Image (spheres, rainbow, N blue to C red):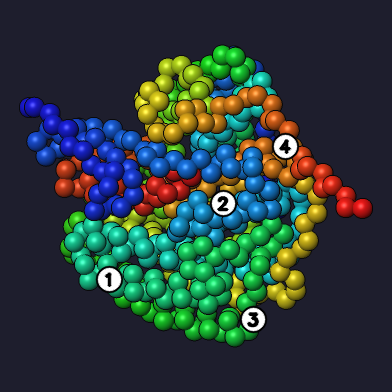
Amino acid sequence: MARTIIPFGPQHPVLPEPIHLDLVVEDEKVIEARPSIGFVHRGLEKLVEKKDFLDFVYVAERICGICSFIHGQTYCQAVEAIMDIPVPPRANYLRTVWGELSRIHSHLLWLGLMADGMGFESLFMHSWRVRERVLNIIEATTGGRVIFGSCKIGGVRRDMDAGAVRDTLSELEIIERDTREITKVFIHDNSVKKRLGGVGVLSRQEALDFGCVGPVLRASGVAQDMRKLGYAAYQDLPVEPVTRTDGDSYARCAVRCDEIFQSITLIRQALDKLPPGEIAVKVTGNPKGEVIMRTEQPRGEVVYCVKANGARNLQRFRVRTPTFANLPAMLKLLQGCDLADVPVLVLTIDPCISCTER
Amino acid sequence: MKPEQTLEEIPLAGLLEGVGAMRAKGGRMVQICATALPGQFELTYSFDFDGRLASLRVQLPASDPRVPSIASIYACAFLYENEMHDLFNIKVEGMALDFHGNLYNTTVKYAFGDTKAPAAKPQAAAVPSVA
């Protein structure tokens, strides 16, 4: 049978981000997917050689428009580890709260995109309606909606007073209630099950071999979550990774649904135990040394390699984003799939090309 | 909090053996990080063992940076290796999937590959005293 190449992207309705795939098809079957990324590589890592290490947190936050806070947090944690800076407990708890809010809004964003990809428009709108409430909390507590600007080396820039804590908890009640309604559809609706069930199966061993991270790895039965390393407030708030064993698109969707509720619980616990005291310590001197810092972003493990030689500018700043780690698995999933499943399979790893083009 | 991690410097000739040992011990490949230093490149290969991070490091001369591909041991390494080539101009021999320099379309070719010692920052001109 003759082979045809169908170009997919770099601008495509299912994913308004610049990734391009050459899909080699025979009839309706995809035989091979050849990826191209790098259309807008920004070279932010290189900027570290010019920016003061204290100011660079603003650049790190701008790596991504969804998990921006956790990028800033990971950068701060890396420099704090090199400089041995004791971050106040209250700052660690506040970082955890904002990090989990980021996870909730990222997962709700993904659920909306997936509903849209399936043609389930009303579900897409409901998912993003709830997400708006999460963004409202973030705006009320940090002043920003996408880039919070709240994290700094040595702690955080903003505090949450009793009123903000009360309002956040009350808003979380509504978010939890509404999310439960939405996730009921994602988990139990027959059309969703038929569209996602058995599509793009990744076995446990394959997920490990392809270097997967985050919900993609956990949906294949691997209980791996960087929050278990105990950074920020996670040393006091134990996290049990949410897993599924089917390894298909439906399992990946179910993991993300459950993780929203896990994040809501973690925020409640963090706000309940929010310790009193300072929110930041003064930073003196320049960093010297190196560290590899890992945290759990909504899409999975992010890796920051930071190397400093005692100057105001760092020597090397390297970010391995979760999408970069999940791309090989996506290519594997596309091999042999039906052409109609391509949008679902691209979305199923929750790709963030903005992060990848750091 | 300083995360638990180890770093072992190994000769370039022992890279495949070292990475193979990581694989045999059940390590999950986490990342490869290239760094341009004065006169050389430094490559750091990191692996995860249930939360513990172990890294191997090799040095390459800036004059002819070549490294064998580890894709036969970790298939997912091809993206890291193409990145090393496209950003640092490091030749990776035996890549499983070679984008031939087209993974990253940067305006400046090999934008991260400068191994010359960083130039000293220009000092601000002294302000003349108004006496």
Horizontal relation, residue A236 to residue A86: left or right: left
Q: CA distance from mark 4 to mark 1?
A: 52 Å
Q: CA distance from mark 2 to mark 1?
A: 30 Å
Closest to the observer: A22 or B68?
A22
The numbered mark 1 sits on a residue in which chain? Answer: A
Q: CA distance from mark 4 to mark 3?
A: 44 Å
Tell me whether circle 3 and circle 2 mark residues in contact (CB < 8 Å): no
The numbered mark 3 sits on a residue in which chain? Answer: A
Q: Earlier in the sequence, mark 3 or mark 2?
A: 2
What residue does disc 1 label?
A125
What residue does disc 4 label?
B121
Q: Which secondary structure lies at badge 3?
A: loop
Horizontal relation, residue B16 to residue A255: left or right: right
Q: Earlier in the sequence, mark 2 or mark 1?
A: 2
Horizontal relation, residue A93 to residue A199: left or right: right
- Circles 3 and 1 on the same chain: yes
Residue drawn at x 69%, y 43% is A313
What residue does disc 2 label?
A60
The amino acid beneath tag 4 is: Lys
Closest to the observer: A133 or A263?
A133
Q: Which secondary structure lies at badge 1?
A: helix
Q: Is residue A254 above or below residue B69?
A: below
Q: x and y percent of residue A351 in the render?
A: 37, 49
What residue does disc 3 label?
A161
The amino acid beneath tag 1 is: Met
Q: Which secondary structure lies at badge 2?
A: helix
Q: x and y percent of residue B98 in the render?
A: 37, 23
Residue drawn at x 92%, y 53% is B131
Q: Which secondary structure lies at badge 4?
A: loop
Q: CA distance from mark 3 to mark 1?
A: 32 Å
Q: Residue furthest front?
A: B131
Tell me whether circle 4 and circle 3 mark residues in contact (CB < 8 Å): no
